[in-house]
């Protein structure tokens, strides 16, 4: 069921004026256009008709953009299916690496460089401390997913890492488990993460990989940049480890909440009135209290677009034992050392869209929603609206679809 308000509605009503008054990157323009057109006649679609009662249904194509709140459920299901075979019968931990607020503006102007450094230094931190015999003395594997937002859509870059509670001993002879309920010292992780990240950031500056504009233009001066690094070294950095999961089955449910998330989901949107957007947010400082926030539509769009990633940037990555190039062999070794069979082997999801949709949502696209007795059959494909100008003749349903797209724009 369509929620009463969507991000797409806000973009359609206020996106044109926003484009006129704000400089946007090509990626941001592409995301706005995709969300505005998602599941409208602009992208084309198809017509289904019931073979019993004649009921007709027009379905428009999805944009499939990874920033679109409407296009993540089926992609998430496919991705989680592929991860099922990677699970091990051990406890799992959730570790979060967060960049200090002083780096937010620098990260926004250098997303690809800074976010890559966040991935690489967090991964090196986990693997280095885990390999130290004073801590775990093992090679570990983990998945990391980048989030760049907080509950109020402000820029808040952080990395969620899901880590099995143990690893393969450095000589490859046995499995080393961490203590029950404890993975690695977060204080040790935080200090190494701070040192590695600042060293890598300094190298990026020395090799002229960073740009500085507007309010941080002064950081282009070496002395000013060194002062920033010194201030960041002097403060504590934040690394957080949550309580372990109940078991591998809970890992998949947990991953589903993080891997294909976007800055804000449609169900959190409450109202768009007089040019203002109201949405719910969770106040973590007050025991996860549900609160309301109202922003101008302009400010809402600005905050949403802060979280558009560079084109081709991978926000989900796997490291160590789970790295793609040797994951199968390493996982086989883990199971051998644990004395465990491949208990969580893949159970392939239905390959066709209709069956997959029913598996994920519990709703059938095949059964007629009107008479509940007939079967919906494809009767017509609708070309994208942009391609209709030179097409003739146009069917009645195609003209209806075009009119609906124009009305919603």
Image (spheres, helix red, strand yellow):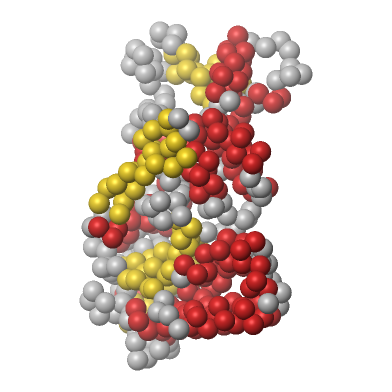
Q: Residue at x 39, y 68 (%)?
A: 96
Q: Where, by quadrant of the figure, is residue 187 drawn?
A: bottom left
Specify whether 99 is left or right of 3. right
177 shown above or below 23: below
Of 38 and 135, which appears nearest the observer? 38
Q: Residue at x 26, y 77 (%)?
A: 182
Q: Quadrant of the C terminus?
A: top right
Q: Quadrant of the N terminus?
A: top left
Pick out the residue farthest to the bottom. Answer: 134
Of 35 and 167, which appears nearest the observer? 35
Residue 15, given in percent of the width and then of the height, sits at: 58, 35
Specify whether 285 is left or right of 409. left
Q: Residue at x 29, y 67 (%)?
A: 242
Q: Where, by quadrant of the figure, is residue 293 drawn?
A: top left
Residue 271, given in percent of the width and then of the height, sits at: 39, 33
Q: Is residue 199 visible?
A: yes
278 shown above or below 127: above
């Amino acid at each position: 069921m369509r929620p009463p308000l969507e991000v797409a509605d806000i973009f359609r009503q206020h996106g044109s004026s926003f484009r006129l008054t704000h400089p946007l990157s090509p990626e941001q323009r592409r995301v706005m256009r995709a969300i505005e057109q998602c599941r409208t006649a602009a992208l084309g679609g198809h017509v289904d008709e019931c073979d019993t009662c004649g009921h007709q249904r027009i379905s428009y194509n999805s944009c499939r953009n990874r920033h679109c709140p409407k296009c993540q459920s089926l992609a998430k299901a496919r991705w989680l299916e592929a991860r099922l075979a990677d699970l091990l019968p051990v406890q799992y931990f959730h570790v979060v690496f967060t960049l200090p607020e002083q780096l937010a503006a620098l990260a926004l102007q250098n997303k690809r460089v800074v976010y890559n450094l966040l991935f690489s230094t967090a991964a090196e931190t986990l693997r280095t401390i885990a390999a130290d015999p004073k801590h775990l003395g093992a090679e570990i594997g983990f998945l990391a997913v980048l989030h760049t937002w907080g509950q109020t859509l402000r820029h808040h870059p952080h990395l969620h890492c899901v880590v099995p509670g143990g690893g393969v001993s450095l000589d490859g002879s046995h499995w080393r488990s961490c203590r029950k309920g404890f993975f690695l010292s977060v204080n040790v992780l935080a200090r190494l993460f701070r040192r590695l990240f600042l060293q890598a950031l300094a190298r990026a500056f020395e090799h002229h990989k960073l740009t500085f504009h507007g309010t941080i233009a002064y950081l282009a001066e070496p002395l000013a940049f060194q002062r920033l690094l010194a201030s960041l070294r002097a403060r504590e950095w934040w690394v957080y480890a949550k309580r372990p999961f109940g078991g591998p089955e809970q890992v998949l449910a947990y991953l589903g909440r993080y891997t294909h998330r976007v800055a804000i989901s449609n169900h959190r949107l409450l109202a768009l009135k007089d040019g203002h957007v109201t949405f719910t947010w969770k106040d973590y400082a007050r025991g996860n209290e549900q609160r309301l926030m109202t922003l101008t539509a302009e400010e809402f769009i600005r905050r949403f677009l802060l979280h558009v990633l560079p084109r081709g940037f991978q926000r989900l990555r796997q490291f160590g034992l789970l790295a793609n190039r040797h994951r199968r062999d390493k996982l086989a070794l883990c199971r051998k050392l644990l004395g465990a069979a491949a208990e969580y082997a893949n159970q392939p999801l239905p390959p066709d869209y209709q069956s997959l949709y029913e598996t994920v949502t519990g709703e059938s696209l095949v059964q007629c929603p009107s008479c509940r007795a007939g079967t919906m059959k494809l009767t017509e494909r609708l070309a994208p609206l942009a391609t209709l100008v030179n097409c003739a003749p146009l069917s009645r349903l195609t003209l209806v679809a075009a009119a609906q797209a124009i009305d919603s724009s």
